[in-house]
Amino acid sequence: MQAFKFVSAVLMLVLVALTTPTKAQDIIMDVIAERYVKLILGIGEHEPGYVDAYYGPAKWRDDIKISTPPLAILQKEAKALQAALAPHRRSTKPSLAVQRADFLHKQLIAASARLSMLSGHKYSFDEETRLLFDAVVPAIHKADLEAALEKLDTLIGGEGTLQDRFIAYRNQFTIPKNRLKEVFAAAINACKTRTIEFMELPEGESFTSEFVTDKPWSGYNWYQGRAISLIQVNTDLPSLIDSAVNLGCHEGYPGHHVFNAMLESNLVDTKGWGEFTVYPLYSPQSLLAEGTASFARFMAFPGNSQTEFEAKVLYPLAGLDAEEAQKYSDTLAALSGLRYARIEGARRYLDGKINRDELIDWLARYQLTSRERAEQGVRFIETYRGYVINYTLGSDLAAAYVDRIGGTDHKTRWKAYKTLLSTPLTASMLVK
């Protein structure tokens, strides 16, 4: 890595002398981008799962595997690249080039923080999310969550605790295992149909899907490059009817699969921005990825159209009573006051304010779920830590951006959403 840095420095000096300022800046940024990719690959060798996707030159990955720099050297490189980016971020004229540099700067802050964590440094929950994901979620007060539970208590009849009543009610909408494949295929197909009505996807894009078990997540998109994905659905716990569209949009169209394909098409293939050939999981890019994926179903199915589609297509496929679709949808909508409960529970647990059993109780109570599902939620928090903010906060930031830029016209909203999928952005850049 040291020899490469020397060659890069000499090359940059020569190119600056021989080209126009704009062209020289582009070349320098490309060199920084290459070093950034190798840095991320290096961190990935120290932490399995850190590199969520890579579709750059195989030689770069192979070379890093053969000779992986130690954490201390990688940390020096992260700091050096931040310093190298500084001149490219100083501009009074906003441009895509400056936005590119700002994005890379935030990604490098996250890489440096992750290296510190791998070296044993511990951050508070809020400091961790600020450094890794460029965002902090304000504290959620327990009294507000209790107030939300009181409102729900009046909506769900029956005997027993609210939690027991809600679980019993929700279980009525479980998809039988022998119908999972058919229901999910129909949901994903509808998500794609509604997406391509407003977005032109890269030629040849496709995905394969499979059902898996023993995972801390409910669904995952493994992006392979060249607009191809593998989508996995976890069947450890029963799948509910609303999960088909939610996962189909989140993992597929217009969520993760489209997000990665658009970045590759617009920024790697068209502009040659090599930094987007690698996706570090613990980075500001994840807040945009998860946020746009969580908001995806509201783009594909605006208004009440998701419920209408489920009642017409998915309920019959699952052998469920379509007459109950609207009531079930309204009941789920009433959970909005509890949306940030998981994040607050994770913050308290990871900051040492509650123990594991107390976190399970917290998730079961404020997510109105079984202890088994709550335990799976704890597995996710223990595995991914502050990553939990990216879904809810990310979705709210994506929604606010689409509302602000796209207004109420559906086509214009899709244009705004496409911007989120195909340009270098982080959370703090969205609210400027």
Image (tube, helix red, strand yellow):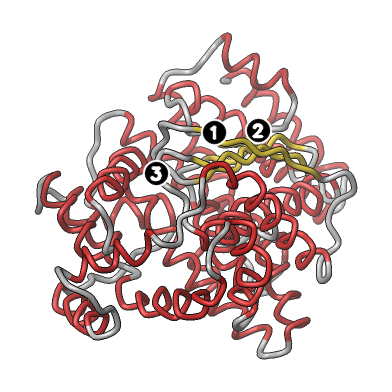
Query: Which mark is on residue 54?
Result: 2
Q: Residue at x 76, y 68 (%)?
A: 194
Mark 2 → mark 3, Cα distance in angstroms: 30 Å
Mark 2 → mark 1, Cα distance in angstroms: 7 Å
Question: In the depicted view, which residue is nearer to us: 309 or 18?
Answer: 309
The nearer-to-camera label among 2 and 3 is: 3
Q: Is residue 205 above or below residue 144?
A: above
Where is residue 289? Give x, y as percent. 57, 55
Q: Residue at x 20, y 48 (%)?
A: 350
Q: Residue at x 37, y 64 (%)?
A: 170
- Image quarter in which the N terminus is found: top right
Where is residue 142? Give x, y as percent. 15, 72
Mark 1 belongs to which amino acid?
Val
Provide the secondary structure element on which disc 2 rests: strand
Circles 2 and 1 in contact, beta carbons < 8 Å: yes
Question: In the depicted view, which residue is nearer to us: 348 or 214?
Answer: 214
Mark 3 belongs to which amino acid?
Leu
Callout 1 crowding tier (Cα within 10 Å): few <14, some 14–19, many ≥20: some
Question: In the depicted view, which residue is nearer to us: 281 or 355?
Answer: 355
Provide the secondary structure element on which disc 3 rests: loop
Query: Which mark is on residue 51?
Result: 1
Mark 1 → mark 3, Cα distance in angstroms: 27 Å
Circles 1 and 3 in contact, beta carbons < 8 Å: no
Q: Is residue 369 visible?
A: yes
- Residue that badge 3 annotates: 237
